[in-house]
Amino acid sequence: MGFAMNAIEVMAFVFVGVLGLAALGAIVLFFVDRFQTEDAIRRNYPVIGRFRKLFTELGEFFRQYFFAMDREELPFNRAQREWVGRAAEGEGNTVAFGSTRNMQVPGTPIFVNAPFPPLDDQAAKTEPLKIGPTARIPYMAPSFFNISGMSYGAISKPAVQSLSRGAKEAGIWLNTGEGGLSPFHLEGGCDIVFQIGTAKYGVRDHDGNLSDDKLREVAAHDAVRMFEIKMAQGAKPGKGGILPAEKITDEIATIRGIKQGHDSQSPNRHPEVRNIEDLLNMVSHMRQVTGKPVGIKTVVGSEQVFRDLFDAIVARGDDCAPDFITLDGGEGGTGAAPMPLIDLVGMSVREALPIIANLRDEHGLKERVRLISSGKLINPSDVAWALAAGADFVTSARGFMFSLGCIQALKCNKNTCPTGITTHDPRFQKGLVVSHKYARVARYAKEIIHEVEMIAHSVGVTEPRQMRRRHVRIMQSNGRSVPMNEILPSYSLVSES
């Protein structure tokens, strides 16, 4: 009995002490807030005003888990993320009761089911497609769905390792992003697309210029199948990146060919590429040096620029043509970019892709220049739409980030990613276990391919690249859908009807 009373007294003293400390802390914060001059809310509402910032920072998480409906969030909603999650875990992606998608939203694509589709045993797997027919070593790309550029540095070592091993398992390619070729890209044994940004990371000399010797070194890897010249990306067209000095480790400095102790600033464009002729010269030179297909990645701002590009290719001869063009949309993502560029600059891939496909085909370059579509295409319907609109391939970065376990915490521009994907902090990286995550990457890719083939079968063709714009209807603001080939007809000598 005495022991119990003593325990109660001790707990009472502790409780009173805690209350006293809390009251003292509140008094201190009251005077700090009242006499500071930076925040008007805290000055006018001491202590209480501090909750505004807390609730603002936590708001995105509360909305994600408790308040937003399945189809409401941006940049990706819960329905999109959960589809990727189920696919990556190998769970069934069937749902019950009915769609949660509002079919009346203008711009919604609706695929046209065939009244008499091919029988199940008549469906075909997508055939490999050649890229770079004039290169010494062309590439027979096995998959229409692949991994878009994510640099080592922007994402972590275990993330790159998981993507490399998963890409090999799924039979797809992995784009290095502009940060150079790391051992972690190579260790999985997958096909690699080496991206060259404006800073020429990994293939630059001491002055930051393109080094032919280093190009040859990279091309000597059998796994490196193509080279991509990055002109622009959707989230920040016309803006070069900055790699802060604190993120430049010995390893990253060696891989990128830069110095430690200083921020590494990428130019906003390739200094030596001043016009279309310079660009075609660069493509031709790199293909000659490497012997492998060379393409470009860019964002559409003007239809005329691409008309001029294709006119120049026709005038010079298609030997000078880029082997592929990767179209990123203004809705594309990145680790960090200024909001005006993310929100306001660059045409959406939904608008750009059909336009550029028409221009390419009009100039007779359909078999010479492959189109790769990127920009927020992470679910089967997105990929199927892009193929029907004119793309030969589709790449995704954020879809594969979700397959790695990304929770859309929106911390990519900081070193605090809670899932270990975009951080170099070992504390967070330990949560990303390569032996588990690579399998999720592979399953996600395989499920996308499987379900796109299922959509193709449903609309009446035996494999995805046979889909055309007539197979997709686009919802209009008047509540009626219109065939995509009526909104923007394909350029073809044969009628789409």
Image (cartoon, rainbow, N blue to C red):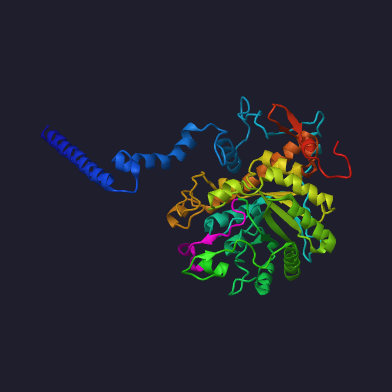
Q: Is residue 142 visible?
A: no
Asked if the stretch drawn in magenta spans residue 147, the answer is: no
Q: Is residue 58 above or below residue 235?
A: above
Q: Main secondary structure of the magenta part?
A: loop
Q: Locate residue 146 relative to residue 134 in the image: left or right.
A: left
**Depth check, front residue: 149 or 31:** 31
Q: Is residue 485 left or right of residue 16?
A: right
Q: Which residues are magenta?
A: 235-250
Q: Position of residue 46 (x, y in %)?
A: 28, 41
Residue furthest to the left in view is 2
User: In the picture, residue 82 is in which quadrant?
Assistant: top right
Give residue 196's position: percent from left, percent from top: 64, 63
Q: Residue 282 in the image: x percent, y percent? A: 72, 66
Comparing 27 with 289, the one in front is 27
**Left or right of residue 243: residue 189:** right
Pick whichever, 17 or 201, lies toward us.
201
| Residue 256: quadrant of the picture | bottom right
Residue 331: where, in percent of width, then height?
61, 46
